[in-house]
Amino acid sequence: MDIREVPDPRIGQFWTNYADLLKRFHVPPKAIPWYRRHVEGFMSDHPEVRLRSHTAETVEYWLERIGRQPNINAWQYRQKVDALRLLFGHFLRRPWSSGFDWDRWLNGMRALESDHATIARTYEMIDKAVEDPKNHLAKAYPDLYRRFLVAIRLPDYSTNTEKSYLGWINRYLRFHNNRHPCDCNEPEVASFLEHLTLQRKVAGATQSQALNALVFFYAHVLERPLDKIGPFKRSKKPRRIPTVLSAREINSLFMQLTGVNRLIMHLMYGTGMRVMECVRQGTPLAIPVSCQPGCTGSP
């Protein structure tokens, strides 16, 4: 059935169902409209072909053609590949998709630009990570590690998030004696989370971070989204309330700085940039008006 030939309500339902699938695989909400645009671009390039009639050859030819475009960024290309992978492999469930080498297309594009605003990493890091004895995922399951890198380096994931998620995945593997992750399911995830509470005495936010890392790993890397994990002991440590400087204290701090350090502090305070996002900028940015010397209020 070609969705372009059915009434509008059914077309709308198609996109609603596709968006629901993306949410199940934890695609960031602001990326969902872009996934739809990638699919629509694929459809517009094949106006006479019904979606369910596409084969591995037509998808491969389209990806080759798109990959030759000089103005496409690496992360954009991988997002297009991922949109089609979820469409044909998990939404339409086409038989040929299970044998399609999606990993090759996801990895085949050039390395991400070193100055990419949200990533700033290259794939040369893979070989070094595989040699790292502390990286259990890379050492025991290098293919899964590469798939993890592809998934985490799509937009909206920072360098710190990658390191944090990888750390929790490695702890999870060690806890279960390096069993293959596909052999571990919701009960194993629950037992690990309880271990963090009962034995490690971690805070609730730390336990939640570990859960987010494993949810991401199962959905994006193993492509087996976790179902209901079931009851497990949650941390009850009280949350720490951060100390916030007053406007006067902030202004006094700014007055003690000069040059580049002053510019960096103004940018971070005025825009909410992370430290690494700020220092990686290749060219100076204008200081927001709200952060000019003498500012006594929040931006």
Image (tube, rainbow, N blue to C red):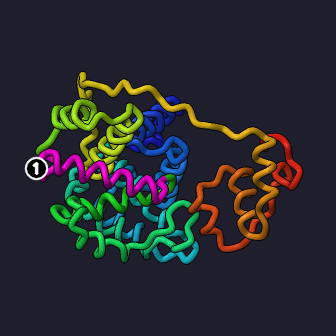
Callout 1 amino acid: Asn
**Closest to the observer, 258 or 54:** 258
Task: Inspect the magenta stretch and tell me whether residue 221 lies in it.
Answer: no
Q: In this view, does 281 lie to the left or right of 227?
A: right
In the figure, residue 203 lies in which quadrant? top left
Q: Residue furthest top?
A: 231
Residue 216: percent from left, percent from top: 34, 45
Identify the residue shown where x is 75% and y is 56%.
266
Residue 287: percent from left, percent from top: 80, 59
Where is 138 relative to 274, above or below? below
Residue 91 visible here? no
Identify the residue shown where x is 30% and y is 66%.
57
Task: Inspect the magenta stretch and tell me whether residue 162 lies in it.
Answer: yes
Q: Residue furthest right?
A: 294
Magenta segment boundaries in residue numbering: 157-182
Where is 153 relative to 215, above or below? below
Q: Is residue 135 left or right of residue 242?
A: left
Residue 202: percent from left, percent from top: 33, 36
* Residue, disc 1: 177
**Closest to the observer, 72 or 178:** 178
Identify the residue shown where x is 29% and y is 64%.
146
Q: For the N terminus, which image quadrant? A: top left
Residue 122: percent from left, percent from top: 43, 73
Q: Please, what is the dominant secondary structure of the magenta stretch?
A: helix
